[in-house]
Amino acid sequence: MYQAFLIKYAEIAIKGKNRYLFEDALVNNIRYQLRNVDGEFKVRKENGRIYVETEGEYDYDETVAALQRVFGIVGICPVILTEDEGFDALCQRVAAHIEEAYEDKHFTFKVNARRARKNYPMNSMEINAAVGEKILEAFPETSVDVHHPQVMINIEIRPLINIYSRELPGPGGMPLGTAGKAMLLLSGGIDSPVAGYMISKRGVTIEATYFHAPPYTSERAKQKVIDLAKKVAAYTGPIKLHIVNFTDIQLYIYEKCPHEELTIIMRRYMMKIAEYFAKQGKCLGLITGESIGQVASQTMQSLAATNEVCTMPVYRPLIALDKQDIVTIAEKIDTYETSILPYEDCCTIFVAKHPVTKPNVEFIRKSELKLAEKIEELMETAINTTETIMVEAE
Ligand code: ATP
Ligand code: MG
């Protein structure tokens, strides 16, 4: 029924000379998301608008789902394109559209006509009035409300006539590739995939680092993280994932440091190693799934202690979200079911019975002095034996 989609994006963000960069990125990202959808698509810019045109048969639901994964899109309007075959034919097209698209006809509407082509025999006001009348005739349950219509029926007279009234929500945000790159610390939990998604939604390209601790964490736990990366990649595009073997560092910390400080010290080394790969990959920041007070290692004191070892900004988009809010997003982006699979992560194995909740950075530094003998060498080995893979959406 629809031959095209009109793509709406937030224009406030893109005033000025960066506008074309933003739009070109959006066009490319739309093409990328549509690459595996059944159908032939043409994506083009026209007068500050982006159109996705279809050719022949295509899968409507898949197309909409793909467009709803493109950051930067705020609305998707399915459009009927029709030849100009006179005013009566236009009214019939509009009526057929209302018949099909709205099961319940008890709504208020307004017709909003625009002439991009001035040789049309009626002006916009005349089209509004005449089409409105025809709609009222065809569907007596409807009524007109020019101030707050429930349904806005847009008719644009261009070389072809465009009819659209529905706007499906897009994800919002900024087009991928317009904001630089950041390194996500990706674990198998609920939070970090959501954190990666949120930062990526602002246009940021994502790399990821996972700390694996075989044999304490299984191959299945590693596969789970790869599966999560695949799910996130459905939005962010391919993710370069660094899988760091963290076992020896963890065991060494376990051997040398007070057990109640284990998690914090371990976190500090994770941040350092993630930052190493971040610098190598020209990332501008780190991303974690931390949220104030969620667990002992995420009190403000713990966050301060973890943060201290980083020289890059650490982005924590979940910092003020409640768990339920995070779960809601995880469900929306389809990572939740994977995240709750019950495979151990390295943090649950080396977890102390009574972890410090208000670590003192001075004490932590002092404890870390006990690692002086071997830690540099262990970090170097961990870095040199890291496995790096590209993860793509399925
Ligand atoms: P998540 O659900 O993301 O695992 P969490 O509530 O389990 O979070 P923690 O285990 O305290 O929280 O981890 C806090 C953050 O540290 C995570 O969100 C993630 O960014 C990072 N992190 C924790 N463990 C790992 C790991 N094994 N590999 C990579 N990053 C990790
Ligand atoms: Mg975790």
Image: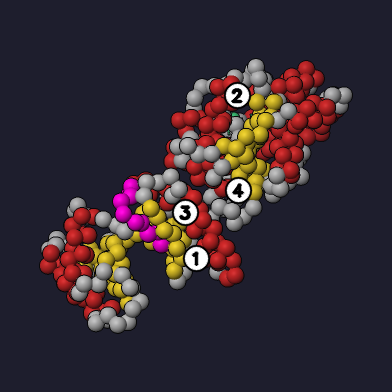
Residue at numbered disc 4: 205
Among the 4 quarters of the image, the one containing residue 223: top right
Residue at numbered disc 2: 345
Q: Are marks 3 and 2 in contact (CB under 8 Å)?
A: no
Q: Which residues are magenta?
A: 51-60
Q: Using the image as rendered, state which of residue 155 and residue 167 is in the foreground.
A: 155
- Of tags 3 and 2, which is closer to the observer? 3
Amino acid type at image mark 3: Ile
Which residue is at 44% across, 49% downward?
34
Mark toward the start of the polypeptide (3 vs 1):
1
Is residue 33 part of the magenta span, yes or no?
no
Q: Is residue 89 above or below residue 9?
A: below
Amino acid type at image mark 1: Glu
Mark toward the start of the polypeptide (2 vs 1):
1
Q: Secondary structure at mark 2?
A: loop
Q: Is mark 1 within 8 Å of ligand 1?
A: no
Which residue is at 83% across, 27% downward?
377
Mark toward the start of the polypeptide (4 vs 2):
4
Residue at numbered disc 1: 11
Mark toward the start of the polypeptide (3 vs 4):
3
Distance from Cα at disc 2 to Cα at disc 1? 43 Å
Amino acid type at image mark 2: Asp
Q: Secondary structure at mark 4?
A: strand
